[in-house]
Amino acid sequence: MILIFIRLIIFLALTLVLFPFQLIIFIFIKKFSYLIPYFFHKICSVIFGIKINTYGKVPKNFPKLLVCNHASYLDILILGSLIKTSFVAKKEVSSWPLLGILAKLQNTIFIDRKISSLTMQKNKIIKHLQEKKNLIIFPEGTSSDGNKVLPFKSSLFNIFEENKGTKIFLQTITIVYKKINGKTMSFNDRKKITWHSDMNLITNIFDVLKKFSIEVDVIFNDEFLPNKNNNRKKIARYCWNRINNNLINSLNRK
């Protein structure tokens, strides 16, 4: 409990100190609003004992849509500490206490899966990318238990069908939860440390905070430009295959 208390106090203090600065930047000089979140996530990774092993690299071509598997709210912290980026998240996140506010200040694009909202959301994503900003999506549409990659929903990939003349680079990323307190995770360990299904968020956060350290692999594949003849389903399948292969290979590597 002492470790949990110390981590929460430091996290809240850091948030309170940086919040007014981020708010000012977000309102008045929005193009630099990625800077504080980038360093905030780096510091939080240290606070929460997250060790990140990276493989591959993020090239510098823009605009870039980054596609990643999703197993926990920690994914945001991990990716945010490695890349100056914004995220696409489900609409419900915007109403979460504290986390929803932080997400808004990081230029998160909140999506509603209703058919009537798809065009507007697609336009927001295209506008963001055309401003030469990175954007991360989690096409599974929910979080898994970290032991597998769920099927991808292809709707977010339709920007490549309707904007065939636009050069939007794609890059796949795989997050693999590997160790707890220096010990290799078992299948069941990974199910407990990730946040999925109907798990209680607060309970899971406390379970994570009491772990001295969590080690993850983050694997970056080479970027690519989707073939203009490919449809959204083919692109989604190609990305899924890349990420799934990375996950399997990493889990088999001790």
Image: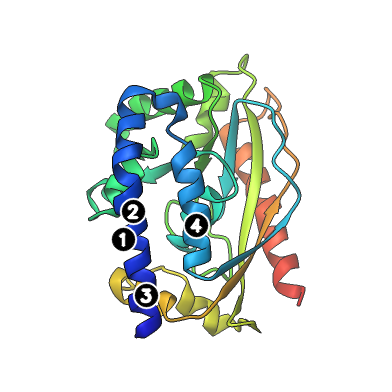
Which quarter of the figure is the C terminus placed in?
bottom right
Q: Quadrant of the N terminus?
A: bottom left
Q: Amino acid at mark 1?
A: Leu
The disc, 1 or 4, on the residue closer to the chain's N-terminal end is: 1
Mark 3, residue position: 6
| Occupied quadrant, residue 186 | bottom right
Callout 2: helix, strand or loop? helix
Q: Position of residue 140 (x, y in %)?
A: 49, 52
What residue sits 36% from the left and 84% below the top? 2
At horizontal 76% and vertical 49% (from top left) the residue drawn is 56
Query: Could you say where residue 46 lies in the image, as x and y percent from the top left?
Result: 53, 64
Badge 2 is on which residue? Answer: 15
Residue 217 is situated, as x and y percent measured from the top left of the image, at: 66, 63
Outermost residue on the top side: it is: 165
Tag 2: Cα neighbours inside 10 Å, few (<14), some, or many (≥20)?
A: some
Provide the residue designation for mark 1: 12
